Image (cartoon, coloured by chain):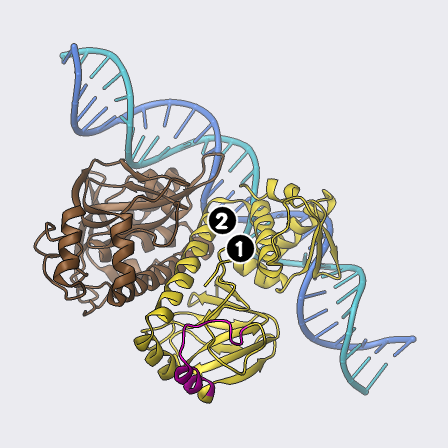
Chain colours: A yellow, B brown, C blue, D cyan
Amino acid sequence: MSERKDGHLSEVPVLCMTCDARLRGVCGVLDPDQLLSLARTSSKKRLETGAELIGEAQAIEGYSNILSGVVKLTKGLPDGREQIVGLQFAPDFMGRPFQAESAITAQAATNVVLCSFPKRTIEALIRQSPLLEHFLLKQTLRELDEARDWMLTLGRKNALEKVASYLLLIANAINPAVQPDSQTIAFDLPMSRLEIADFLGLTIETVSRQLTKLRIDGVIEINQNRHVVVANPNRLRLRSGC
Amino acid sequence: MSERKDGHLSEVPVLCMTCDARLRGVCGVLDPDQLLSLARTSSKKRLETGAELIGEAQAIEGYSNILSGVVKLTKGLPDGREQIVGLQFAPDFMGRPFQAESAITAQAATNVVLCSFPKRTIEALIRQSPLLEHFLLKQTLRELDEARDWMLTLGRKNALEKVASYLLLIANAINPAVQPDSQTIAFDLPMSRLEIADFLGLTIETVSRQLTKLRIDGVIEINQNRHVVVANPNRLRLRSGC
DNA sequence: TGTGTCGTTTGATCGAGATCACGGCGGGGC
DNA sequence: GCCCCGCCGTGATCTCGATCAAACGACACA
């Protein structure tokens, strides 16, 4: 298994032979029998924006490969306050092994296509295949690193730095081909202002104002609310606090 | 391997035969040869409060079992702002497999005793022993859950809720014997006001004021700055936002 | 062409927590 | 004893982001 520069695994274990070309046949983690049993139980699903994959305290029924789109993981307080605690992009593998019920809500932030498997099948495979467990450990460690990075942002950055950090994060996640530092990047925001606010621990008004500030300062361009152009990513990095 | 109610593993793989009785000989994860090679390379270390185990961007040289004390994991911004992104208590296993250099700083928050092993030894063992990797996956998943819980606190709770949440977290971590919900608990804070502030994304003044508020409201007692008595944990829970 | 809704922006005001300032307490060295 | 220094508490003030309020643009639909 090789790694991309950003730490994502570029070759994920094949978890479904019916998945798209990028995932098909890449990895020798599973033997043909195992692949077959997976393929028999897997199913491709399309989710509309906003669809809930699983809610807090619900029983965990399966695991999924994200084939396209963005899934947000959220936690809420009883009074309705919400915090996004993680984002998952293709080709992430989603699921929480060894646990009966979910501690978080998973929801489609964009239209999402995923390939999902029953809990039992995956857990049986984990027991059989140390390589699969190794893969899961690496992905979990990466998610932990990302979560800790984000804790620094949530706890210690101001609103402008948070928004700048968010734009850089999305740019990297969506555009995995690593550019030289100062090259123009353009991308569509996969989330609404409310979702960005819930990710950053801010309100929509503050997010909007900081985006406007970055626009007026000439750091970014925004078209039709969602399309962002960053002429010089270094100027953005300067405003991200690190 | 069995789990305590709070999700910690009560029986960790033996990683050192010279460690204290609680850790010695508990687990069949490693075979006698492996144990022997570990014992040969392991060393017991005592660290004073404030001692740094590893710094950001430093090469990772080893792994450790915490035998006693509390270790804080921090990330900093270039201008000096700091955020604690994790706390580790005995008998946690500390280390970041599969990575050449550390993304965080690890520092003793109290006096700490640990049993440490060279990187090469542990990584060789991981390659040999799927059970050890399984153990690491479970611990990493637990740390990820804890990090995400804390992201909700950092992003969406106010100062009073943060301090109340912190007290509950410490009470549980230090006093792993699970009490009935409403029984009096008492413990020593393992961290200074500055460290608490760096954990909560607040300033020392705000931490101090919220502790005073809880004291005046009769929710907690504080003696000699560090010793805390919570007569009715439910009253604290009510103020923690969840 | 109006009319509704939803997501967003912008303006005005408020307030929680940061910042600045100072004083108290306790432990260690001499 | 005295002084010093690190940690802590508290008061006064300021500021950033929340809150409240209104309007705008895009789109759907009649």
Q: Nearer the viewer, residue B226 or A149?
A: A149
Chain letter for mark 2, please.
Answer: A
The numbered disc on residue A116 is none
Q: Which residue is mark 2?
A: A153
Residue A227 appears in which quarter of the rendering? bottom right
Quadrant location of the C terminus of chain B?
bottom left
Write down the residue under mark 1: A200
**In the figure, is residue A158 to the left or right of B230?**
right
Tag 1: Cα neighbours inside 10 Å, few (<14), some, or many (≥20)?
A: many
Depth check, front residue: B145 or A230:
A230
Residue B88 lies, in percent from the top left, at: 27, 51
Chain label for disc 1 = A
Residue B234 colored in magenta in the image = no
Residue A37 forms part of the magenta stretch: yes
Q: Earlier in the sequence, mark 2 or mark 1?
A: 2
Residue at x 31%, y 43% (from the top left corner): B61
| Residue type, mark 1 in image | Leu
> Is D29 or A47 nearer to us in this picture?
A47
Q: Position of residue B106 (x, y in %)?
A: 32, 43
Instruction: Label 2, secondary structure: give it.
Output: helix
Query: Relative to B30, is A69 on the left or the right?
Result: right
Residue B33 vertical placement versus A164 (above, below): below
| Depth check, front residue: A147 or A28 | A28
Residue at (25%, 58%) from the top-left corner? Answer: B125
Q: Are marks 2 and 1 in contact (CB under 8 Å)?
A: yes
